[in-house]
């Protein structure tokens, strides 16, 4: 049984074919960040500039503090959440590791790049603030080049990523990948999570989820809460809120229509949950998302004009 099901895969295109690298700046002044379990082929390097965030990476929970860095390897299941209403600001660099490949088998390819690309070695997950200043400075350079719309931001970013990777390697911030030769109980829990992701738009019962894991309903609830630090119902509602957030930002569908399309059967309950999670109404969230999208479009247009 493979926990990396396509249901949990994030198919988002990060960048474009010529520049397969994206930089995300996410500011949550009132909390409300909730990125459900997913995996992708890309590497994701995160700098939590302000606040604290809860991460679960490859089944291990981490509380990440201000100025900590998190390195998420390719094909690793992970989720990110605000801690209650704690404000946070994070920056993420998401890129295809394939951009580091070269057709020429030089020393860098053989000793550095290839072992990472083939998964023989993986980067350490957490780089604490008190030991990551030099890495954070290089990441800041990547973010600045992108934010200021510099013409050669992609070239600069690629060079800086190689420089970072070289530092990680030189400082021994990596380990040999541990291969599992067994299927543990959590594998079945990932199937339950996959079921939620596939069926969030309809009614989901605890009985259905417990049957997937082969556990009694009572034990399933206790084990789920211990594994994911939230009840099954909370996870279902959080995932539905995640999908409503996407639809609010990406469509012009009526809010009531979005509510029912994402599995909620009461508009008032949906709005109450949304306000509690995002600290704003769905309508205000939509306006803010559209405004941010407009600014991003204008920034890209300005950058293209400079070229």
Image (spheres, helix red, strand yellow):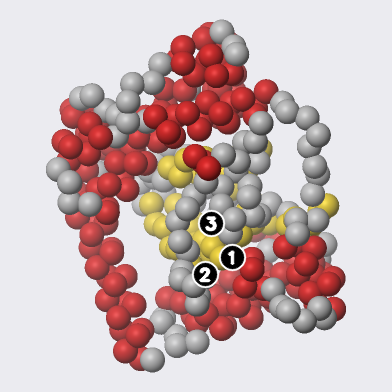
Q: Is residue 85 visible?
A: yes
Name the residue at 78% across, 37% down.
180
Between marks 1 and 2, how big is the CA–CA gap? 7 Å
| Left or right: 291, with 228 as reference point | left
Q: Is residue 40 above or below residue 34?
A: below
- Residue 272 appears anywhere in the view: no
Residue sitting at x 23%, y 63%: 291
The tag earlier along the polypeptide, 2 or 3, is 2
**Callout 1: SS:** loop
In three-dimensional space, the C-alpha distance between marks 2 and 3, rounded to whole angstroms, equals: 19 Å
Q: Mark number for residue 21?
A: 2
Q: Total label count?
A: 3
Instruction: Tell me residue 154's x, y (percent).
Output: 52, 80
Figure quadrant of residue 225 = top right
Front one among 180 and 92: 180
At horizontal 22% and vertical 52% (from top left) the residue drawn is 251
Q: CA distance from mark 1 to mark 3?
A: 21 Å
Dot 1 or dot 3: first in sequence order is: 3
Give the secondary structure at mark 2.
strand
Disc 1 marks which residue? 96
Mark 1 touches mark 2? (CB < 8 Å): yes
Give the residue at mark 3.
48
Neighbor class of circle 2 (other Cα within 10 Å; few <14, some 14-19, many 20+) is: many
Within 10 Å of disc 1 (Cα), the crowding (few <14, some 14-19, many 20+) is some
């Amino acid at each position: 049984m493979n926990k990396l099901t396509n249901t949990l895969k994030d198919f988002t295109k990060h960048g474009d074919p010529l520049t397969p690298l994206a930089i995300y700046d996410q500011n949550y002044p009132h909390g409300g960040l909730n990125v459900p379990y997913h995996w992708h082929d890309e590497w994701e390097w995160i700098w939590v500039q302000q606040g604290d965030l809860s991460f679960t990476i490859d089944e291990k929970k981490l509380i990440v503090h201000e100025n900590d860095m998190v390195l998420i390897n390719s094909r690793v299941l992970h989720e990110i959440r605000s801690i209650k209403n704690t404000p946070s600001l994070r920056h993420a660099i998401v890129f295809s590791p394939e951009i580091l490949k070269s057709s020429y088998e030089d020393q860098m390819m053989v000793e550095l790049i290839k072992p990472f690309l083939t998964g023989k070695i993986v980067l350490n997950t957490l780089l604490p603030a008190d030991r990551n200043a030099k890495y954070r400075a290089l990441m800041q350079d990547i973010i600045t080049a992108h934010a200021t719309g510099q013409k050669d931001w992609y070239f600069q970013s690629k060079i800086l990523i190689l420089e970072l990777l070289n530092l990680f390697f030189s400082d021994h911030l990596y380990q040999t990948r541990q291969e599992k030769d067994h299927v543990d109980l959590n594998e079945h829990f990932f199937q339950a999570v996959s079921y939620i992701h596939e069926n969030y738009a309809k009614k989901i019962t605890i009985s259905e989820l417990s049957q997937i894991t082969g556990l009694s309903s009572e034990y399933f609830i206790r084990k789920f809460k211990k594994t994911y630090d939230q009840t099954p119902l909370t996870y279902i509602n959080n995932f539905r809120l995640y999908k409503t957030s996407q639809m609010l930002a990406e469509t012009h569908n009526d809010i009531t229509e979005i509510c029912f399309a994402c599995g909620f059967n009461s508009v008032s309950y949906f709005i109450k949950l949304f306000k509690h999670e995002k600290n704003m109404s769905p309508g205000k969230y939509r306006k803010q998302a559209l405004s941010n999208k407009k600014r991003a479009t204008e920034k890209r247009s300005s950058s293209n004009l400079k070229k």
